[in-house]
Image: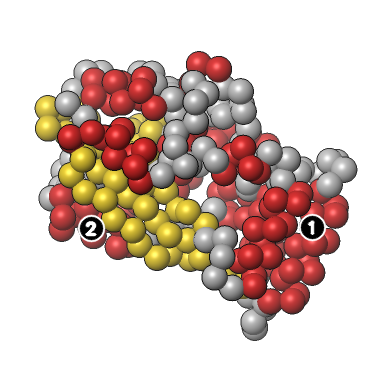
Amino acid sequence: MQFSDTARGKDDVLGATSRFSNRVHDYVRHRPDYPPALMAWLRETLAVDARWRVADVGAGTGISTRMWLDAGHDVVGVEPNEAMRLAAQAAFAGHPRIAWSDGTAERTGLADASVDLASAAQAFHWFDPEPTRAEWARILRPGGLAVVYWNTRLATGNAFLEGYERLLRDFGTDYARVAERHPDDAAMRRWFGDGLRGQARFAHGQRLDFEGLRGRLLSSSYAPIPGHPRHDAMLAALRGLFDAHAVEGHVELDYATRVFAGNLS
């Protein structure tokens, strides 16, 4: 897909800043992390150094933030959603290498040339692309690197994955509109322009029991919440799907982790 025509940061027609506020608990516990191969690729292919200061933009509850901290970086997490930011701050309370900014991708609140690397993970498809590019070019040091990556859940390949995709389309409140926001490879290459230095794809996955699968579903912004007319029917359908495909009490959600990296000026 291409970038959405909607100016995300300005119009925010899908409520990107607030739509996860009532899903923080499930988001923290059940969203996937990122494969070790991603950081290895950044180190080996692009010479990303642990001494680099990282702006983790759209940090959410800190899933991507943890990856950078575990790799030895100083990090400033930029997150406008208060509930998600507070959850991340609690998770990393007392950590000596993390700071936080109540900012957006388009207006981070960071100083000029103050970071070596600007990172965006799963939140990137909510950003307004051109203002984000200009803002990141401003906060990056000369020669600094922008890295954009996310997990794309596979919708085909086996009966469980295909059934889960049907469930989302049948019960999701605005699933199609959200799914269409993910940029394709060509759109990402245009966003980086001549500064693109590399792109890669890695296999990743989650092995989930039923409670894990339920939490993963409810962490999605398009999943009907308790009290919605479709909520109970959705969970009943999820239970049936799980029971039909679980092996030793678990199912596998498969992802392709896509990453793009380059310079912006």
Provide residue 52's location: percent of width, then percent of height. Answer: 18, 40
- Position of 122 with respect to 169 (left or right) is left
Provide residue 71's location: percent of width, then percent of height. Answer: 26, 53
Q: Quick one: label 2 or label 1, which is nearer the N terminus?
A: 2
**CB atoms of marks 2 and 1 within 8 Å:** no
| SS label for mark 2 | helix
State the scheme by which the image is colored: secondary structure
Residue 146 visible to the viewer: yes
Q: Amino acid at mark 1?
A: Leu
Quarter of the rendering occupied by the C terminus: top left
Residue at figure coordinates x 18%, y 44% from the top left: 197
Judge whether 6 appears above or below 239 on screen.
Answer: above
- Position of 134 with respect to 107 (left or right) is left
Residue at figure coordinates x 87%, y 43% from the top left: 229
- Position of 85 with respect to 217 (left or right) is left
- C-alpha distance separating marks 2 and 1: 38 Å
Q: Determine which residue is flagged by label 1.
A: 235
Quarter of the image for residue 226 reads top right
Characterize the local packing of mark 2: few (<14), some (14-19) or many (20 or more) Cα atoms within 10 angstroms: some
Characterize the local packing of mark 1: few (<14), some (14-19) or many (20 or more) Cα atoms within 10 angstroms: some
Provide residue 166's location: percent of width, then percent of height. Answer: 70, 58
- Position of 228 with respect to 169 (left or right) is right
**Front residue of this view, candidates 94 and 81:** 81
**Front residue of this view, candidates 24 and 206:** 206
Residue at figure coordinates x 56%, y 65% from the top left: 156
Residue 108 visible to the viewer: no
Q: Determine which residue is flagged by label 2.
A: 41
How many marks the image carries: the answer is: 2
